[in-house]
Image: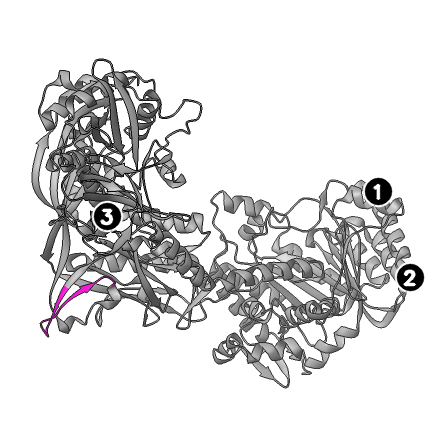
């Protein structure tokens, strides 16, 4: 088996060029979701596609893209033809590297053989299904409409259509989930032989329905339970040949998500669509978050960018460490890392076995404590 | 010099909020000392804090010119007294400057503990007492019942109780006439050697220490060379005068007169309240009786939340002490709280006032340790030591016996709450001395109680168990031997000095349990399990554990929220800076503040 992850891979991604395209349409709003989404506005798909084309066309020319990520929302609400157009538009404008990763997110219940076939023909090679759980009770609590069988079918359909990389998203730690339910979920997910697993702790994001419920007295996810769940998935996934390369992400060798690797390596990426973010030439840009504003502004030729910040010097060093420490391969020590390991807190964390320095890189040995480390490093 | 026969010196004594300051204002207004328009509400309370709390901290004296309808012109010296027992020494000195007292009682609330405590002080001082029921304009006023209560306590006849409304002015003229008629003029020999009582003092930034004096014998003249008999210091009288209430210099103060004296002394500690002033040229043989040093009763460590504020705290205490001779403080070092001061106070209210003034007037953020009292420890070597801080307690092996201060506490409560009060006091190791019905529905209970039990949340508990109706007053009642132990609190095996407390052995477990449970909630999870233990010496009496933190990471960090996550972590990082390291344990500043709160 080739190494699933390596310092070389972690660092090489810094030189990649990525593009993120946000599709805000959803059939309904999930109670835990704080992404930019709109419900019941699918009729505006063509106007949205048009705005995306304008936005892409107005981006200054760049290098061929190493990774394209179409996320949402629910990209499949747009239909295969429009998604194909987006990839064409990006390829025409910037070009695609020969080994480019072109991926999208999809809901299992929307995924049909026809759609899969069209998307594969348009160049999509990676699909990420929001499986979340294989326990109906948990799925209901998460506000999801698909069944475990839908996920199995979707994976099968994707394989047949020729998708070379299939990811499953799982969410752990909902209060209705118990240990057995989680074991069942992990085993069922691994039973589908995914190339990639993203396992996320359910997080109470401000402003979501979940957040309002918790404030009103509903039970919140228990961090200790979540730690148990995380540990369990590591053991089971590794036994199936998946290796963790980031706090919440595991992959078979060669299947780590290129787009995300680019983000964590401090590489550059463009962001298109409502609420999308980009990072190019040291500038972080954020697009407006309201769909109407986005459509109006782009079509009026005003651009979608709401804010842009130049990140340089100490700030850039902080970001490099903050992002890089999430990687299993760690991050090159550099100025900030050197200062940290020399500090009292750094020594304490080294002594406690939370971090180590390995070949000039700072590596978090207890990924569940990554933010504790980052806060110390931010010094 | 004023004719002695025309002088009346009096105080107004009252429970808090019974309307003393309003009555004083009305008296000033009626005698023309102030026009209604010029008058700031409640002239006698000059400090903002006094106004807010409705109490008077420093006594002042005001001269009123009064024309009696049938008996002509009189000089009335109104000597204001602090209403609270913490300042009972100051009260007693103010009363010693008077021949009479107006005992003011709220027509709705009736006789309260401070009413009685101060009335007894006035009776002990041999003062003529004029009972007055105030606030007769209130809808809930019951002047007849309250008059009967007063008579029940002090004797006399209900019809002699004056009924006033300081707010509307009703009855105030009658009261003025009664002051002249009932209170005897001062005695004293104008030709005897000078004896003047210093009954209060304050620090003026321009004039230095200003003494309030009552001349008993002889004459006090501007320019006199004076001797302060208790301190032995000699100073010149650079100015003497009276307050109307504006300061008006006079050439001479004669027997019975009340006024101020300025000597140019800059440090308040050099002038002692209760001291006797005499003339160097012709000194008195004997000082006036009753002088004693103010003795702090309650002690607490006060520390700046931010260690960098230590110097500012010292400066603030120095400034407060300029005007408060009873505030004592010395530097103290705590491993947990850093550099601060162990401060001594006359009582709980005094402590609260000092702390509030430090925070408010000097903009300091403070942590105070639990209040403690002064214990007397007899050691094996035969030595007696006064222990004001739990840290100074010798090892149990060295201790032969410990004595703790007791107080005589007077509690007045509606009779329906007697059971609740008894339960509270018994839980505080109280011993009943007396129970006395003031009327069919109100009871006076007298207890002997350890002061340590009173300083610990007693007043709040009393209020909550009696729906706010009970009142409390207390006075020192000597020392008694008790079975006391020091309970330490250990974090990860290390004692945290700020949390140590001296408690009765029977309550040690309860205290230790409460502290460790409280701290378990307050101390954030660390990289390792943190045992929190309460111990007497090396014996652990309670234990809790803060389990090690297992998860501290955001699930996702994708391209869209790099900036948001960075800001979030940065903010959390700022929170971390407010942590104090106790050994290897990070303790948030708030944990100290919360754990040390008395209201548990």
The quadrant of the picture occupied by the N terminus of chain B is top left
Residue B92 as seen in the image, left or right of residue B401: right
Residue B13, horizontal then vertical, whole percent: 22, 32
Chain for disc number 1: A
Co-location on one chain, circles 2 and 1: yes
Image check: B104 left or right of A297? left
Identify residue for label 3. Answer: B273
Residues at marks 2 and 1, CA–CA distance in whole angstroms: 23 Å
**Residue A171: mark in rendering:** none
Query: Circle 1: is it few (<14), some (14-19), or many (20+) Cα within 10 Å?
Result: some
Mark 2 nearby-residue class (10 Å; few <14, some 14–19, many ≥20):
many
Q: Which secondary structure, mark 2?
A: helix
Q: Position of residue B200 (x, y in %)?
A: 27, 44
Q: Which residues are magenta?
A: B377-389
Q: Name, please, the residue furthest toward the left.
A: B433
Q: Chain of mark 2?
A: A
- Which numbered tag is attached to residue A93? 2
> In terms of secondary structure, where does tag 3 sit?
loop
Residue sitting nearer the eye, A234 or B167: B167
Q: Position of residue B275 (x, y in %)?
A: 20, 49
């Amino acid at each position: 088996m080739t190494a699933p992850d390596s310092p070389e891979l972690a660092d090489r991604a810094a030189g990649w060029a990525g593009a993120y395209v946000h599709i805000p349409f959803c059939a309904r709003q999930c109670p835990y979701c704080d992404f930019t989404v709109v419900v019941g506005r699918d009729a505006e798909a063509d106007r949205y596609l048009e705005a995306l084309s304008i936005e892409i066309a107005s981006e200054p020319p760049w290098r061929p893209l190493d990774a394209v990520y179409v996320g949402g929302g629910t990209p499949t609400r747009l239909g295969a033809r429009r998604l194909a157009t987006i990839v064409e538009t990006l390829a025409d404008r910037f070009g695609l590297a020969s080994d480019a990763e072109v991926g999208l997110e999809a809901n299992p219940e929307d995924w049909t053989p026809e759609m899969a076939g069209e998307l594969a023909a348009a160049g999509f090679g990676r699909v990420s299904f929001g499986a979340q759980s294989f326990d109906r009770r948990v799925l209901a609590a998460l506000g999801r409409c698909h069944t475990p069988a839908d996920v199995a079918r979707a994976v099968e359909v994707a394989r047949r259509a020729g998708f070379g990389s299939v990811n499953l998203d799982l969410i752990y730690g909902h209060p209705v989930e118990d240990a057995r339910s989680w074991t069942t979920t992990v085993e069922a997910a691994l039973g589908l032989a995914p190339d990639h697993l993203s396992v996320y702790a359910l997080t109470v994001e401000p402003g979501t329905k979940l957040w309002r419920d918790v404030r009103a007295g509903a039970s919140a996810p228990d961090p200790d339970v979540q730690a148990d769940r995380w540990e369990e998935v590591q053991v089971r996934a590794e036994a199936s040949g998946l290796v963790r390369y980031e706090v919440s992400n595991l992959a078979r060798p060669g299947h780590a998500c290129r787009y995300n690797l680019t983000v964590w390596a401090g590489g550059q990426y463009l962001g298109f669509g409502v609420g999308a973010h980009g990072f190019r030439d040291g500038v972080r840009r954020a697009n407006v978050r309201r769909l109407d504003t986005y459509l109006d502004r782009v079509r009026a030729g005003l651009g979608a960018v709401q804010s842009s910040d130049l990140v340089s010097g100490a700030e850039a060093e902080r970001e490099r460490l903050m992002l890089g420490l999430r990687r299993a391969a760690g991050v090159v020590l550099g100025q900030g890392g050197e200062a940290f390991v020399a500090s009292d807190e750094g020594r304490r964390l080294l002594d406690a076995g939370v971090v180590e320095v390995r070949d000039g890189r700072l590596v978090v040995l207890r990924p569940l404590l990554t933010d504790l480390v980052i806060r110390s490093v931010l010094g | 010099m004023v004719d002695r026969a025309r002088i009346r010196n009096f105080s107004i004594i009252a429970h808090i909020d019974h309307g003393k300051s309003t009555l004083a204002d009305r008296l000033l207004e009626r005698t023309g000392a102030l026009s209604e328009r010029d008058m700031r509400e409640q002239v006698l309370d000059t400090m903002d804090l006094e106004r807010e709390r409705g109490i008077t901290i420093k006594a002042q004296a005001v001269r009123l010119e009064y024309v009696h309808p049938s008996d002509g012109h009189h000089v009335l010296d109104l000597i204001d007294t602090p209403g609270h027992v913490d300042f009972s020494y100051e009260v007693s000195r103010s009363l010693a400057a008077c021949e009479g007292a107006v005992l003011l009682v709220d027509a709705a609330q009736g006789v309260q503990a401070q009413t009685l405590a101060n009335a007894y002080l006035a009776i002990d001082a041999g003062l003529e007492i004029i009972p007055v029921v105030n606030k007769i304009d209130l809808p809930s006023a019951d002047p007849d019942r309250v008059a009967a209560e007063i008579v029940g306590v002090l004797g006399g006849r209900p019809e002699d109780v004056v009924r006033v409304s300081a707010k509307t002015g009703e009855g105030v003229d009658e009261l003025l006439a009664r002051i002249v008629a009932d209170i005897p003029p001062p005695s004293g020999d104008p030709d005897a050697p000078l004896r003047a009582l210093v009954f209060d003092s304050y620090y003026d930034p321009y004039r230095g220490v200003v003494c309030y004096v009552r001349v008993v014998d002889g004459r006090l003249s501007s320019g006199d060379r004076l001797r302060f008999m208790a301190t032995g210091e000699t100073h010149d009288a650079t100015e003497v005068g009276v307050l109307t209430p504006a300061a008006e210099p006079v050439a001479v103060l004669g027997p019975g007169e009340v006024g101020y004296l300025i000597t140019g002394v800059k440090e308040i500690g050099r002038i002692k309240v209760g001291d006797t002033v005499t003339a160097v040229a012709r000194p008195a043989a004997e000082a006036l009786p009753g002088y004693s040093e103010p003795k702090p009763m309650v002690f607490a460590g006060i520390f700046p939340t931010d260690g960098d504020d230590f110097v500012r705290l010292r400066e603030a205490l120095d400034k407060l002490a300029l005007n408060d001779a009873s505030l004592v403080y010395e530097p103290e070092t705590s491993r947990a709280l850093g550099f601060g001061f162990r401060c001594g106070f006359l009582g709980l209210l005094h402590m609260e006032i000092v702390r509030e003034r430090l925070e408010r007037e000097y903009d300091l953020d403070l942590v105070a340790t639990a209040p403690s009292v002064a214990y007397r420890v007899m050691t094996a070597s035969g030595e007696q030591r006064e222990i004001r801080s739990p840290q100074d307690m010798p090892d149990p092996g060295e201790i032969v016996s410990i004595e703790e201060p007791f107080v005589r506490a007077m509690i007045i409560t509606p009779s329906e709450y007697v059971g609740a009060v008894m339960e509270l006091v018994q839980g505080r190791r109280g011993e009943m001395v007396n129970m006395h019905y003031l009327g069919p529905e109100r009871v006076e209970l007298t207890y002997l109680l350890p002061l340590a039990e009173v300083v610990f949340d007693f007043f709040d508990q009393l209020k909550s168990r009696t729906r706010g109706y009970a009142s409390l007053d207390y006075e020192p009642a000597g020392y008694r031997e008790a079975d006391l132990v020091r309970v330490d609190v250990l974090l990860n095996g290390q004692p945290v000095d700020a949390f140590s407390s001296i408690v009765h052995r029977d309550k040690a477990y309860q205290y230790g349990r409460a502290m460790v449970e409280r701290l378990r909630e307050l101390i954030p999870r660390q990289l390792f399990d943190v045992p929190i233990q309460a111990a007497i010496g090396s014996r652990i009496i309670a234990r809790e554990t803060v389990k090690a933190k297992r998860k501290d990471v955001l699930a996702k960090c994708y391209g869209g929220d790099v900036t948001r996550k960075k800001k979030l972590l940065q903010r959390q990082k700022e929170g971390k800076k407010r942590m104090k390291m106790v050994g290897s344990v990070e303790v948030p500043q708030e944990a100290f503040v919360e754990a040390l709160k008395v209201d548990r």
